[in-house]
Amino acid sequence: MKPHTQPLCPQAYNLLLPASSPAAAPIFTSFQAAFFLPPLTCRQMKKVPFARVPCSSPFRIFEPWLTNTVKIHYYTSQMEVKLWNDKREREMYENFAELFAIIKATEKLEKAYVRDIIPSSEYELECQKLIAHFKTLSSTLKDTVPSVERFHDTYKMDCPAALNRLVTSGVPATVEHRAASAMSSSASASVVAECVQNFITAMDSLKLNMVAVDQVHPLLSDLSASLNKLSILAPDFEGKTKMREWIGRLAKMGAADELTEQQARQLHFDLESSYNSFMAALPSAGT
């Protein structure tokens, strides 16, 4: 009799993967069926009476939506595979199907966002829903699926973006980038305040006649370091270049040496000029 090779069900994927050799034809036990077959869902189940494949060309059957029993017919033999034995196992496979669907949906959503197919607001809303469902389901399946990465690899899902979003990040990309931007803005504000403080401290020390090298050098070093932290300042910013020049000049002097009155006056002028340039370079200048 000619073997039946039509799809098991029009609505099903019916993905048939050929084994490497006839000798590699699988003999499914209940445990092996649970391991090899993708998750099931009762809501999408269709009646699948059987599928017959030639012994000379064995296949492993991967069918996402099956009834509780699948009969795999060969020319010479027939095997019956039970997909669950009780209500608890059936619910477990339904949960597997939900997890499978969430990961796949997240992968599609991430790709749509990267390609600018979906607006950021809509992406964020849908992504938050998927993440919330994923976290709820993960806690439910923590005993049966201790590792989502292993689940992903077992079913050969190939969804790296979804794993990153659901497991690693845990927040939508829009929220992640906003947080990074906020942290960057906060850090910049802190560095600006540090620069202002170092400018004022250096100028006040000169007014108090603190002109010894071991007094001036640390102040200028701190100021130069804080200016270099601020990314909005160009490498050739006036304050940076002048501070480097003064630090190099002081490095050639002894610790107990003092600046002359003319040197102290010039340094104060350079500090004040650099401070004014610094304030003008800030984005909020003039507001």
Image (tube, rainbow, N blue to C red):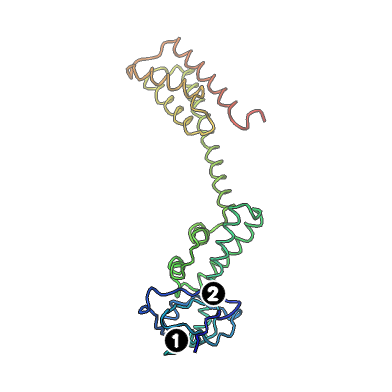
Name the mark on residue 162: none
Question: 272 or 119, which is in the foreground?
Answer: 119
49 relative position to 249: left or right: right
Query: x, y (%) of residue 71?
Result: 49, 87
Local secondary structure at mark 1 = loop
To which quarter of the image does residue 67 belong? bottom right
Residue at image point 50% right, 23% down: 239
Answer above or below: position of 144 versus 1: above
Q: In this figure, which residue is indicated by the disc labeled 1?
A: 74
Residue at image point 64% right, 53% down: 120
Q: Amino acid at mark 1?
A: Tyr
250 relative position to 140: left or right: left
Local secondary structure at mark 2 = helix
Whichever of labels 2 and 1 marks the residue nearer the N terminus, that label is 1
Query: x, y (%) of residue 216?
Result: 41, 21
Tag nearer the camera, 2 or 1: 1
Q: Amino acid at mark 2?
A: Ala
Crowd class of label 2 (few under 14; some 14 to 19; many from 20; radius 10 Å): some
Residue at image point 44% right, 81% down: 33
Question: 220 or 79, which is in the foreground?
Answer: 79
Query: x, y (%) of residue 46?
Result: 59, 83
Answer above or below: position of 85 versus 221: below
Distance, label 2 to label 1, CA atoms, is 28 Å
- Total count of labels: 2
Query: x, y (%) of residue 190?
Result: 52, 37
Contact? badges 2 and 1 (CB < 8 Å): no
Name the mark on residue 97: 2
Question: For the C terminus, which image quadrant?
Answer: top right
Answer above or below: position of 222 versus 64: above
